[in-house]
Amino acid sequence: MTPEPATICIGCWQQLHLPVPLRGPFSVPLRMFGIRPSRMNPNTCTICEMAFTKVMKARAVTIDATVMFADLRGYTALTQHVDSTRMMSLLDAFYDDCSTAIWRYDGLLNKTIGDAVLAIFNFFR
Ligand SMILES: [Zn+2]
């Protein structure tokens, strides 16, 4: 079961104790400034997404975080027996299940690469 989405950004709250509304009537004015739920984690905002992207692009920076990489076992062999339409819907289901699990534990879905997902945990601490 998918948990209820957060009403305020968990990143802004944990880092700055700032209640940045993500949903509901209070979020409407912020959306005019491009502040909305992040695609990396719908419980964080686009400001947090920019902060994360900036840290990831920096060359000589050390952060304490947990990195998770997961891919589908037997993917290459499977692509030889399953048509591309079914393969796409299988990947969609895989990404959906992964993102639900990642967001449940406040992770950021950083990248999807072919049959793989890369997630970062403990970034907002
Ligand atoms: Zn935020």
Image: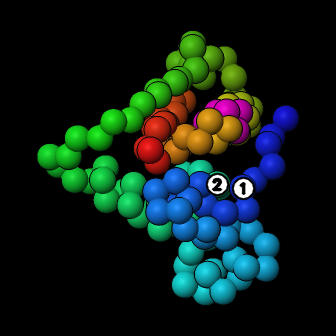
Location of residue 123 in the rendering, given as x and y in whole percent from the top left corner: 43, 44
Q: Which sits in the foreground, 98 or 77?
A: 98
The residue wearing badge 2 is 43
Is 98 inside the magenta-drawn segment?
yes
Residue at 52 percent across and 53 percent down: it is 14
Front residue of 90/11: it is 11
Compared to residue 25, the image places residue 45 above or below, namely above
Question: Can you name the residue that lies furthest to the right here?
Answer: 1
Mark 1 crowdedness (10 Å alpha carbons): few <14, some 14-19, many ≥20: some
The amino acid type of the residue labelled 2 equals Asn
Q: Secondary structure at mark 2?
A: loop
Q: Is residue 61 magenta?
A: no
Answer with left or right where residue 46 lies relative to residue 58: right
Task: Give the image location of residue 64, x and y in percent.
Answer: 33, 36
Q: Residue, x 67% and y 63% (percent of image)?
A: 8
Report the span colored magenta.
Answer: 97-102
Which image quarter is the N terminus in?
top right
Ligand 1 closer than 8 Å to label 2 CB: no
Tell me the element at label 1.
loop
Q: Quadrant of residue 115?
A: top right
> In screen coordinates, is 33 left or right of 3?
left
- For residue 121, above or below residue 74: below
Residue 37 seen in the figure = no
Who comes first in sequence, dot 2 or dot 1?
A: 1
Is residue 82 rendered to the left or right of residue 114? Answer: right
Q: Which residue is at 74% across, 68% downward?
A: 23
> Is the C terminus in the top left, top right, bottom left or bottom right quadrant?
top left
Mark 1 lies on residue: 6
| Residue at the front extreme, as displayed | 17
- Amino acid under label 1? Ala
Mark 2 residue crowding within 10 angstroms, few (<14) / some (14–19) / many (20+): many
